[in-house]
Image (spheres, grey):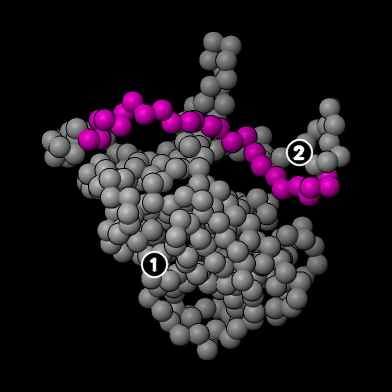
Amino acid sequence: MASDLSNILKDELSNTLEQLLSQPTKCESVEVADFSKVDSSQCVEIDVKFEFKDIVSNWNFFIPTSSAAKFEYLMLGGTGDLKEHIDDEITDAVNEIVSNICGSISTSTNAQGFPDISGLKHVILGSKIVECSERENNENTYSFKLNLDNSISEVIIGFDDIMLPFLSGITGNEAVENNSNISDTNLQNDVGQNFSSIPSTSGIDSLLSEESSKNLKLLFDIKLKLSVRLGTKLFLLKDILKWDIGEIIELEQMVNEPLDILVNGIKIGEGEAVIVEGKFGLKIKNIGNDSSRLSQIGLG
């Protein structure tokens, strides 16, 4: 099976917006898009080209007026009034946001070392304002409902056919990847074919076949890098070049907010810092079940 980027896409979509807009953001749901139900008459459409190995894939981002105006408003610090119509400033802000989202997706994906996706990079091809009523619904176009600052904002993304197997968690398309790296693909199929049935308990042996259980256990001694993200913030290059010893850098994270738990650069849960025998430790406060964790780190 092709490597699944679904969780990376949802996480980086949420995380990048949260960093850029300084507001808590979470992807609540994903569903096939219906432009007739979009709460705005217009969208900013941004065309993006992704490349990896010998594959070229084109994505189309559609940001409705209500979402686009809110994004620009929050990027400016929440000053002034929300605009009712898309203008050049809103379009520029959305372009920057989508570029950052795509960059984060590429960075996170490349950090995983997937055998069938390497050297992922993107190029923004252009943007334009389109009428939602003129867009035809397509089964490959999905609406991401984001809880942004306690209200729902919509981001719509259209994928081409070649990308569907790499987003099987969203699209449901699980076609076997047909490339020259047969050994890598077969290994991934053998190890991951039954991971979707793993529950939150530890009874893995009772649910997997003997062969699959053995394959899974072969991976138990693989070392994965655990990191804890204290906080993030975007800076201009000119400001970074001004830093010197003693500089205090204020992060977006509040002191009472949970810390992100990352495995190989992918967020799998949240926790709080503790002291263990004079060393920093981490107390887990929120974490997915076995199946979701395996999927998030590219083994599911």
Nearer-the-camera pick, 152 or 54: 54
N-term mark: 2 or 1: 1
Q: Residues within 10 Å of mark 1 (few under 14, many from 20)?
A: few
The one of 238 and 204 positioned closer to us in this rendering: 238
- For image coordinates 72% across by 69% down, the residue present is 92
Q: Is residue 272 above or below residue 164?
A: above
- Tell me where residue 12 appears, x and y as whole percent: 54, 52
State yes or no: residue 10 in magenta. Answer: no
The kind of secondary structure element at disc 2 is: loop
- Looking at the rendering, the stretch of residues picked out in magenta corresponds to 215-239
Which residue type carries mark 1? Ile
> Which amino acid type is shown beneath numbered disc 2?
Glu
Residue located at (47% from left, 36% from top): 263
Quarter of the image that includes the C terminus: top left
- The residue shown at (44%, 43%) is 113
Q: Is residue 261 left or right of residue 149?
A: left
x and y percentages locating residue 175 in the rendered image = 28, 62
One can see residue 72 in this view:
yes
For label 2, the residue is 250
Mark 1 lies on residue: 162
Image quadrant assignment for residue 68:
bottom right
Give x and y (percent) for residue 38: 52, 78
Against 215, residue 273 (above or below) is above
